[in-house]
Image (tube, helix red, strand yellow):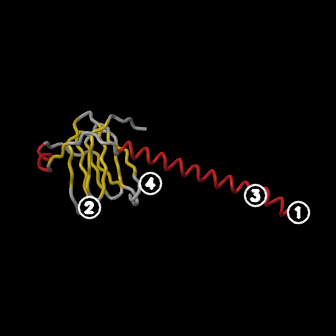
Amino acid sequence: MAFAGVAVCVAAPLVALTVWHELEIAADHRAQARALTRDLTRPGPACREISEAQHLRRRRPMRNVFAFNGVWFGRRFGHADCMMIGLYEAGAGDGYPACRFTAPAVLRVAFAGGPVHIFDVGVGTSATVTVRDHVARCALTAPFRRP
């Protein structure tokens, strides 16, 4: 019986410390996600949207096309970094995709069976695209460097 009492006295603080540590990590992750959401949704000048016909007249293909969370993104140049944001905002549900692009020149955002948005960003300019409820928004941003 004495052994059981010692085991409880040793195990209880260890369990409490582990739970406390996990809660601290979760709170830190939420704070980082909120900060990232603020950074990615900071208003900047809107990208100029062009029509599919205007884009096709340029005769320059989208070399880099990828899907992220059910949305197809295309860019002519540069790098992309996508993530789900807004997971810890009130009423945000499951969050929404946001992608940062380095110098894409042109961005194409398409949905399966839905609208297509083409943004003329310009060479050497970075942009962030957020997608909520099948509406893509593009904002010019300060250059970011790929991690």
Residue designated by label 2: 112
Dot 4 amino acid type: Tyr
Residue designated by label 1: 2
Residue designated by label 4: 88
Q: Kindly report which numbered mark, 2 or 3, lies closer to the viewer in this rendering.
A: 3
Which badge, 4 or 1, comes first in the chain's sequence?
1
Dot 3 amino acid type: Ala
CA gap between label 3 and label 1 equals: 14 Å
Q: Kindly report which numbered mark, 4 or 2, lies closer to the viewer in this rendering.
A: 4
CA gap between label 4 and label 2 equals: 27 Å
Residue occupying the far front of the picture = 90
**Secondary element type, mark 2:** loop
CA gap between label 1 and label 2 equals: 66 Å
Residue designated by label 3: 11
Residue 106 position in % (x across, y down): 22, 42
In the rendered view, tell whether residue 88 sits above or below residue 41.
below
User: Dividing the picture into quarters, in which one does residue 38 lie?
Assistant: top left
Dot 1 amino acid type: Ala
Q: 52 left or right of 19?
A: left
Q: Kindly report which numbered mark, 4 or 3, lies closer to the viewer in this rendering.
A: 4
Q: Do the numbered discs 4 and 3 sit on residues whose CB atoms are within 8 Å?
A: no
Other residues around mark 3 within 10 Å, as few (<14) / some (14–19) / many (≥20): few
CA gap between label 4 and label 3 equals: 33 Å
Which badge, 1 or 2, comes first in the chain's sequence?
1
